[in-house]
Amino acid sequence: MTENTSVDVARLRADIERLAALPARELPGDAEALFLTFRELLATGKIRAAEPVDGAWEAQPWVKQGILLGFRLGRVVPFPGEDRPEFFDKHTFPVRQLSLADEVRLVPGGSAIREGAYVAPSVVCMPPMYINVGAYVGAGSMIDSHALVGSCAQVGRNVHVSAAAQIGGVLEPIGARPVVVEDGAMIGGNCGVYEGTLVGQEAVLASGTILTRSTAVYDLVNETVLRGSAARPLAIPPRAVVVPGSRPARGQFAQREGVHIYAPVIVKYRDPGTDAAVALEDALR
């Protein structure tokens, strides 16, 4: 958040936390105007659902409270298309209307960005893709076809979210950290990253990799197993190259039947050869 908005944001945070504690019937008449100010700060990237603090990512629960306040205030209304209602949603969360000044390349074909999402200049959106409220997508990133950036997910600069990949969202519990994909990472096609997982800078997830807080990731390079917990989400180290793998299931029956369990594997860490391959993505931009 920028210095010239810090005082206003501090006041806004106090107001959001106060309103979040009230029953819906007791919300004051100016609550919607306050929410619209909050939503504008989200859309311009001045506030975020999670922020780096001293080298670690911390959730900002009050930001999630503000988004949930918008749902409480919202009424389901028709949003008109050319000749009939195009969709029905809360009036507080319309589709974001971009202009040329936003410098976002939004290719035609059925994509949508919900109001309250930040999409930086030079982001490329290939159809059809969806970016949900509270999400943050950094400069130079590409959100490819059939990809999802979920509520409050934080995507850094120069990230490629490949076709059909899902960056999971989270609104509740409000204290839970959203998924974070740091600068320069590449998320392969049909990947799924959920439950607050952190994908470190310049990491590569091969196509089909699924990561959740309970997923055990086997680091063959360092001969260790990475796991998340209730207090600490799964963290993929910077520059790690992760591919889908499997390990034998336990028990005599599983061994007799040859049953294996899905297990992502870190097979290497990025070197100049890997960087050259990933650099091909720049041509798509």
Image (cartoon, rainbow, N blue to C red):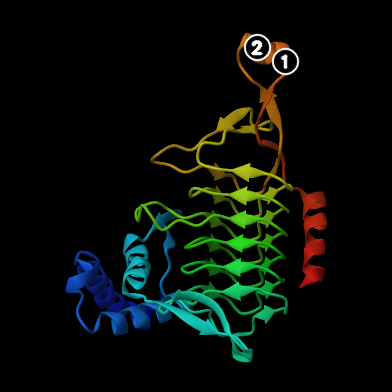
Residue at image position (32%, 74%) is 73
Residue at 31 percent across and 76 percent down: it is 9
Q: Which residue is mark 2?
A: 253
Q: Quadrant of the C terminus?
A: bottom right
Is residue 45 visible to the viewer in this orientation of the structure?
no
Count of marks overlaid on the render: 2
Residue 255 percent across, percent down from the top left = 69, 13
Give the camera-side residue of 148 and 79: 79
Tell me the quarter of the picture where residue 126 sits: bottom right
Q: Secondary structure at mark 2?
A: helix
Q: What is the secondary structure assignment of the residue under circle 1?
A: helix
Badge 2 crowding class, 10 Å Cα cut-off, few under 14, some 14 to 19, many 20 or more, is few
Residue at left 70%, top 51%? 190
The disc label shown at residue 283, or none: none
**Residue 97 picture location, percent across and down:** 56, 85
Q: Which residue is mark 1?
A: 257
